[in-house]
Image (tube, coloured by chain):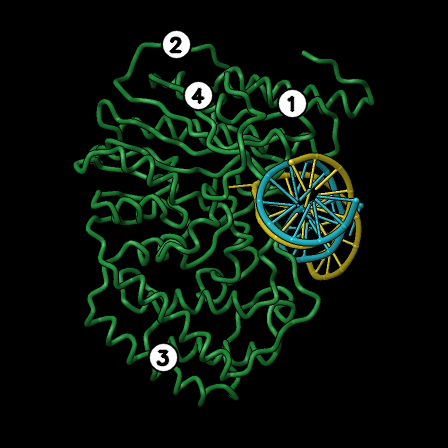
Chain colours: A green, B cyan, C yellow
Amino acid sequence: MMDMMKVKQRSDYTFKYNAKLGRHGWLRLTPAYSVKLVEEIIDSLSEDSLILDPFSGTATTGLVAAERGILAHCFDINPFLIWLGNAKCRNYASSEIKNLRISVDKVLDECKRLVNEDNWLPDIHNITRWWSAHTLSVLGALRRALVNQLGEPKDNHVSSLAWVSFCRLVIETSSAAFNHVSMSFQDEVTSFDIKQIESLYIDILEAVIRSASVPLPGFASVYSVDAREPASIDNIQYSHIVTSPPYPNRISYIRELRPYMYWTQFLDTAREAGELDWKAIGGTWGVATSRLQNWEPSGIALPESLRMVVSEILYTNEKNALLMANYVWKYFHDMHLHFQNLRPRLKKGAVLSYIVGNSSFYGVQVHTEILLEDSLRSLGFTNIGHKIVRKRNSKKELFEYCVYATWQEASRFEPEYFRSRDHQAVQLQFLLECNANLEPTRL
DNA sequence: TCGTCTGAATAGGAACAAAA
DNA sequence: TTTTGTTCCTATTCAGACGA
């Protein structure tokens, strides 16, 4: 057993390292995993590998594969991330980049004319906390000019570079402080005038164009697929899965993506944000939390170890114990469903690498790496194990792991498991005991 | 009153800097 | 060189606001 005390934090294994790496640094998404780690995994693969990343996010895996001349397919359910991922992984011809640069000059001319008009602004809650009224009028004009000259953001188009740059501009001119996880606001909102915004936008665009001009020898593409979805009969089979799924913690992807998504109109209302997060594994934003209260699992068989940890959380008797127990239960239920339906997409001998983090609720440790291994084992995977990647920058028991496994063939292995409805009985009993003001007894 | 939604307050380290 | 102080960085938690 590795001495956990000796495992260090590694900033080169976090998103921080990615910021300086060309296309990888275009937009920040805190939970993005390290380019370096993906490079280490992918560099050991042969060129005829076919990689799948079922949880694409900002398409780190796809882009590293494309940079290494390897073919990769990526899945995601978030339309903004699908668009962004495809923009990051596309090759751009120098002629179309030249034309785009000319179009952007026209955009900036038109922006000057539109700045005093009543332009559309996104319906972001408390928008003046994000941007001053003046900054908003310029951003609104720039957005409208971009739509007029280049059209709305769309897949596989050179104008994506102008829109990615606009997203960067939106964040850089905002008073949101992304220097800690929960994204707070500075006390004073800085106001930018049209000249400042113009020159900032050009600086960002030039940097984006520079990195987009570097050709990619490989090919990667992001598709709109739910990682839990069953594969269809004629689906492609992959030799490697390299991915980082959501972690079982209470962080929402939507939180940090909101400003980008509202401005690019991938999102129009707060309700939609909650709906989208409910679809995501581990979603917690808005309505997703409320739905979790009444969530009921499908009847799939789950590892016995999951019942243990869910029960432990439930029996802490904390105010939100039921919610947290359901949260953990649904997370691993969904990941199990993902592994189950992943199998037909795998070539014989396919190797899985999953970068995940553990978590804790009310002091109950949730050993993600062990729970996922149990799922994989019960589904007939072999060569299962994990290694520690780094110490995370929060509670002392939180680490990042690489869980690995191999798919040989369907085995007749019958694991010890529980059917979800058994747990419902446990939950029901717990509720009855709470209502009766009785001390719940441990099973 | 209850269901939703938002974002400030936190904890827990680690890295870095200054002082002894 | 060692100790002490400061700043920074997070894949969490929860109180308060709002509206039906």
Name the quadrant containing residue A155.
Answer: bottom left
Mark 1, residue position: A427
Label 3 resides on the chain identified as A
Residue A110 location (% of width, % of height): 40, 86
Q: Is the residue under label 3 in contact with that under label 2 (CB below 8 Å)?
A: no
Identify the secondary structure beneath mark 2: loop
Given residues A43 and A81, the one toward you in this image is A43
Which mark's residue is nearer the viewer, 1 or 4?
4
Q: Residues within 10 Å of mark 2 (few under 14, many from 20)?
A: few
Identify the secondary structure beneath mark 1: helix
What kind of residue is marked 2? Glu
Q: Earlier in the sequence, mark 4 or mark 2?
A: 4
Q: Earlier in the sequence, mark 3 or mark 1?
A: 3
Task: Judge left or right: residue A108 versus residue A190.
Answer: left
CA gap between label 1 and label 4 equals 25 Å
Q: Earlier in the sequence, mark 4 or mark 3?
A: 3
Mark 2, residue position: A414
CA gap between label 1 and label 2 equals 26 Å
Q: Earlier in the sequence, mark 2 or mark 3?
A: 3
Name the quadrant containing residue A207.
Answer: bottom left
What kind of residue is marked 1? Gln
Label 4 resides on the chain identified as A
The disc placed on residue A367 is none
Label 2 resides on the chain identified as A
Task: Judge left or right: residue B3 versus residue A283.
Answer: right
CA gap between label 4 and label 3 equals 51 Å
The disc placed on residue A148 is 3
Given residues A108 and A441, the one toward you in this image is A108
What kind of residue is marked 4? Glu
The residue at 43%/26% (across/down) is A336
